[in-house]
Amino acid sequence: AAFISIQAFPALLDLPQDLEVSAVSCGSRHTAVVTRGGELYTWGWGKYGQLGHGNNVSSDQARRVEHLVAEGLRVEDVVCGPWTTYV
């Protein structure tokens, strides 16, 4: 099982390719950001598939949700719940 660092205070995060963030939302153990280009990046606890990567893998690194890109979808906003992510 992957160890995911849970921090109770804000921390700097380096996103790939110096992306500009337009929206951010935090769930109980995961986080999601929307870039100005309409891409969604998620990280944290993924046990229930809430990261949107098609699996239940957790990650300490921000990863782009490739399914949305493959479908040609542009994300405008994101809201994270306890074990969910809505775009």
Image: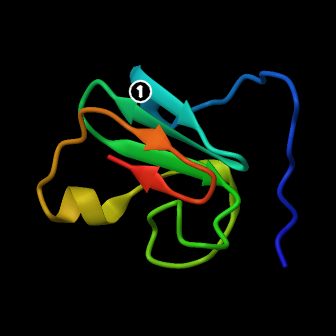
Is 15 located above or below residue 9 in the figure?
A: below
Is 11 located above or below residue 5 in the figure?
A: above
Farthest-out residue, left: 72
Residue 61: % across, % down: 66, 49
Q: Quarter of the image holding residue 83?
A: bottom right
Determine whether the residue tagged by mark 1 lies in a helix, strand or loop: loop
Position of residue 10 in the picture relative to residue 48 (left or right): right
How many labels, in total?
Answer: 1
The residue lying at 69 percent from left, 65 percent from top is: 58
Which residue is nearer to you in this view: 50 or 37? 50
Q: Quadrant of the N terminus?
A: bottom right
Is 72 located above or below residue 67 in the figure?
A: above
Is 34 located above or below residue 29 in the figure?
A: above
Q: How is the image coloured?
A: rainbow
How many neighbours does mark 1 have within 10 angstroms: few (below 14), some (14-19), or many (20 or more)? few
Residue 64: % across, % down: 42, 52
| Residue under label 1 | 19
The residue lying at 25 percent from left, 58 percent from top is: 68
The residue lying at 38 percent from left, 34 percent from top is: 34
Farthest-out residue, front: 82
Residue 30: % across, % down: 65, 49
Position of residue 66 in the picture relative to residue 51 (left or right): left
Q: Amino acid at mark 1?
A: Leu
The residue lying at 86 percent from left, 49 percent from top is: 5
